[in-house]
Amino acid sequence: MADSRSPVAPGARDIAILIGRLLLAWIFLHEGVSLALNFSGAVEMAAQFGLSVPLLVATIALQIGAGLSIAGGLLTRFGAAALGLFCVATATLYHTNFSDQNELLHFEKDLAIAGGMFVLAAVGAGALSIDHWLRSRGQ
């Protein structure tokens, strides 16, 4: 059995984890950057939901920071767990009008993304990540 610390070409598992990380990160990076670039509009939208400006800023920071964490594979388990909890909170706080098909879809989508985040938190970033590179350098 090969030593897991030896430099070996990435396998299909690591490529799949990388693609999954990038796809999961994209929605948060896109939304966080969009909110940051249209901050005044985001403040107006947040006010409609009863969110304060500090909470909006924290949300933008979480989406961008944890999104970058997952995309780059740095502190991936932490970033994935944080975004998983964020998705569960978003689903249960903002998408519970199940008589509206669109709200039901958003509820289910948020829970599905949370599930993907919790799986990523459990398995880690894989070999194609900064986490793996830092572990291999610390040997």
Image: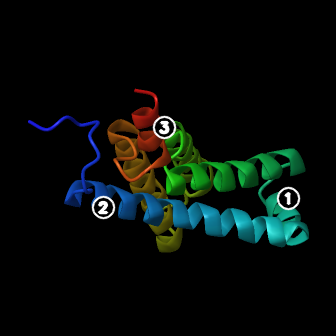
- Check if mark 1's residue and mark 2's residue have beta carbons within 8 Å: no
Q: Please identify, in this view, whether the residue under mark 3 or under mark 1 is nearer the observer.
A: 3
Q: Residues within 10 Å of mark 3 (few under 14, many from 20)?
A: few
| Image height of 108 relative to 38, above or below | above
Element type at marker 1? Answer: helix
How far from the left and from the top, in percent, is residue 69? 57, 49
* Viewer can see residue 51: no
| Image height of 67 relative to 23, above or below | above
Give the alpha-carbon distance from disc 3 to disc 1, as whole Å.
Answer: 42 Å
Element type at marker 3? Answer: helix
Give the alpha-carbon distance from disc 1 to disc 2, as whole Å.
Answer: 41 Å
**Residue 29 left/right relative to 91:** right
Q: Which residue is depicted at the point 49% across and 39% down?
A: 81
Element type at marker 2? Answer: helix
Q: Please identify, in this view, whether the residue under mark 1 or under mark 2 is nearer the observer.
A: 2
**Label annotation for residue 15:** 2
Residue furthest left as drawn: 1
Question: What residue is pinned by disc 3?
Answer: 134
Kind of residue indicated by mark 3: Leu
In depth, the one of 123 and 60 nearer the eye is 123
Residue furthest top as drawn: 139
How far from the left and from the top, in percent, is residue 60? 74, 55
Give the alpha-carbon distance from disc 2 to disc 3, as whole Å.
Answer: 18 Å
Indicate which disc, 1 or 2, sits on the residue closer to the N terminus: 2
Indicate which disc, 3 or 1, sits on the residue closer to the N terminus: 1
Q: Which residue is depicted at the point 53% across and 36% down?
A: 78
Kind of residue indicated by mark 2: Ile
Q: Please identify, in this view, whether the residue under mark 2 or under mark 3 is nearer the observer.
A: 3
Question: What residue is pinned by disc 1?
Answer: 47
